[in-house]
Amino acid sequence: MSLSREATWISYTDQVAKAPSASRESARSSTGQPGPLRADQVHDGDPIELSNGHLIRCMTAGRRHASAHIEGAKVLATDPAVHDNAGIDAGVAWNDGKNLRAPDIVVGGVERKPGWMDKAPPLAVEYADTGQDEDSLQDKISELLEIGTRMIWVVRLSGELRVEVHEAGIPMRVVGADESLEAPGILHNPVPVRALVDPGESNRAALRNLLQRLGHDSLEQIQRDSEQHGERGGNIDGRRSALFTLLCARGLEIDAVTRQRIEMCTDIEVLDGWIACAATATTIAEAIPAGS
């Protein structure tokens, strides 16, 4: 950052910090005048967004809010139509850098290279918990829809779990906790609302997604196929096959010792436990725990 930009940054952030919330909001929305800040002045990880050059502070998430991000991202990133093209808190810059927004989760347009996204994500997800600034949230929704985001899901964590679905030109609709969400042309599978927040539901949906990416309808289908061979050995072979394909899908390297453990295991319950662990593991040691 140049000295002039740094001076602008320090001056403006100090000004915003001292102003009451109502003053910050009115200064940003009522005058319509661009503020002094631009996306190239913001560093990766800075807890802010920009709206027409004006700074919006984005505070850290509470426990419930933060844990929900992981569950939602797990389900969406593994969808067969997404192929891991998703991200958490990915910044989208437009309007010559005067706007910078970072939805909690984005699906689509996440290239694995430095810098801000420059195109609207097809699907964005926001989690809203106690203390949510509703005016700021509605501004963010409007701006993302205006630049081409097709669908925004607002997951309401306070009160009864529900998701508000926003699309351009269509009245907002609410999907209940026991219903599923669909995003035609973006996601292959429907997403149970509870899978966006609950680890068990999220794991089940992610496992379904990963198996489908490998050509299997479900774990149950693999088990049925193995049972058609009629023998206990077929069941065990089917589970081993499911475990190996799942580990490969997760990008977990199988060392020789672990491969031998899997091939020598004849306990169906142990194999099923490893399959469940592999659905969310980030290392081979988490998927196939020592001593299990």
Image: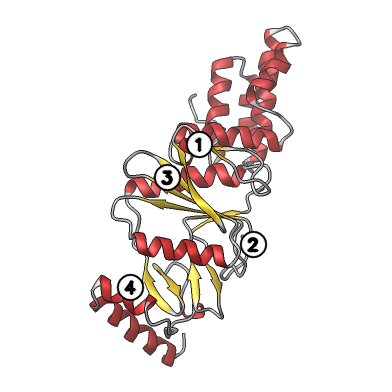
- The residue to which callout 2 is attached is 111
Callout 1 environment at 10 Å: few (<14), some (14 to 19), or many (20+)? Answer: many
**Side of 107 where 175 appears, left or right:** left
- Please say which color scheme the image uses: secondary structure
Q: Specify few, some or many for label 2: CA neighbours under 10 Å numbering under 14, 14-19, or 20 or more.
A: few
Mark pair 2, 1: CA separation: 24 Å
Q: Give the secondary structure at mark 4.
A: helix
Say whether residue 249 is left or right of residue 23: right
Q: In the picture shown, does residue 153 fall above or below 1?
A: above
Which of pointers 1 and 4 indicates the residue nearer the eye?
4
Question: Nearer the N terminus, badge 4 or badge 3?
Answer: 4
- Numbered disc 1: secondary structure: helix
Bin the neighbour count of mark 3 within 10 Å (Cα to Cα): few under 14, some 14-19, many 20 and up: many
Name the amino acid type tagged 4: Glu
Extreme-right residue of the structure: 229
Marks 1 and 4 sit apart, C-alpha to C-alpha, by 36 Å
Residue at mark 1? 202
Q: Amino acid at mark 1?
A: Ser
Residue for badge 3: 68
Residue named by callout 4? 25
| Marks 4 and 3, how far apart at CA | 28 Å
